[in-house]
Image (cartoon, helix red, strand yellow):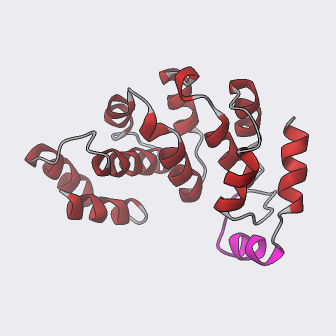
Amino acid sequence: MTQNIKQEFFAYRNGIVAEQLRTAGDPHTMIMGCQLADVIAITSRYEKNATLAQALWDDKSHRECRMAATMLYPIEDFSFETAIAWCHSVESVEIADVLCHRLLRHLDYAPKLWEQLRNSKLPMERYTAWRLALNLLMMNRIERNTDLKSLVEQEFTTAQSPIRQVLERIIEEV
């Protein structure tokens, strides 16, 4: 089934977007240049399936597969351990954003996940944690309070882009 999905990505490919992503430093070797809306349209034709989603996520070289995986994993089957593993393997801001928006923010344990990941030494994992916090804040799943503001301000003192941009948005929301 992964081959069928990849064939659909190929049919939706956009060479101009793919080249722009490569030039901007996208780390994937396989970039079809599909828009997020295209990936959503393609994945909507498939049933959610943990095995399929994991196979797509495991294809680290293919940008669109990584995005699609976040849309095809059944939320009720996505364990805390799998969430940690996926966050640990995020390779780009775009993938982190899609992962947080399409999957992580819907998990019952999402606030706990954010708490565990926010002090990671891995920059992309740390970005993912703060991006998740922004999603949770906008969904009113974490409180807008002085403790959160203090955490954000403390992180801001050493943060670099792109984390800094997410922290600025959180400060605006708090």
> Is 23 contained in the magenta span?
yes
The residue that appears at 36% across and 60% down in the rendered structure is 166
The residue that appears at 59% across and 52% down in the rendered structure is 95
Please indicate whether residue 124 sits to the left or right of residue 171 in the image.
right
Residue 157 can be seen, yes or no? no
Please indicate whether residue 84 sits to the left or right of residue 38 in the image.
left
On-image quarter of the N terminus: top right
Q: Percent x, y for residue 121?
A: 41, 42
Q: Nearer the viewer, residue 12 or 25?
A: 12
On-image quarter of the C terminus: bottom left
Magenta span main SS: helix
On the image, which quarter does residue 153 sit in?
Answer: bottom left
Q: Nearer the viewer, residue 36 or 86?
A: 36
* Residue that lies at the very extreme toward the left in this rendered image: 146
Q: Percent x, y for residue 62?
A: 77, 51
On the image, which quarter does residue 39 sit in?
Answer: bottom right
Please indicate whether residue 1 sits to the left or right of residue 130 in the image.
right
On the image, which quarter does residue 74 sit in?
Answer: top right
> Is 30 contained in the magenta span?
no
Residue 129 can be seen, yes or no? yes
Picture layout, residue 13 above or below residue 69: below
Q: Nearer the viewer, residue 20 or 77?
A: 77
The residue that appears at 73% across and 56% down in the rendered structure is 28
Picture layout, residue 143 above or below residue 82: below
Q: Percent x, y for residue 111?
A: 32, 33
The residue that appears at 74% across and 25% down in the rendered structure is 51
| Range shown magenta | 15-27
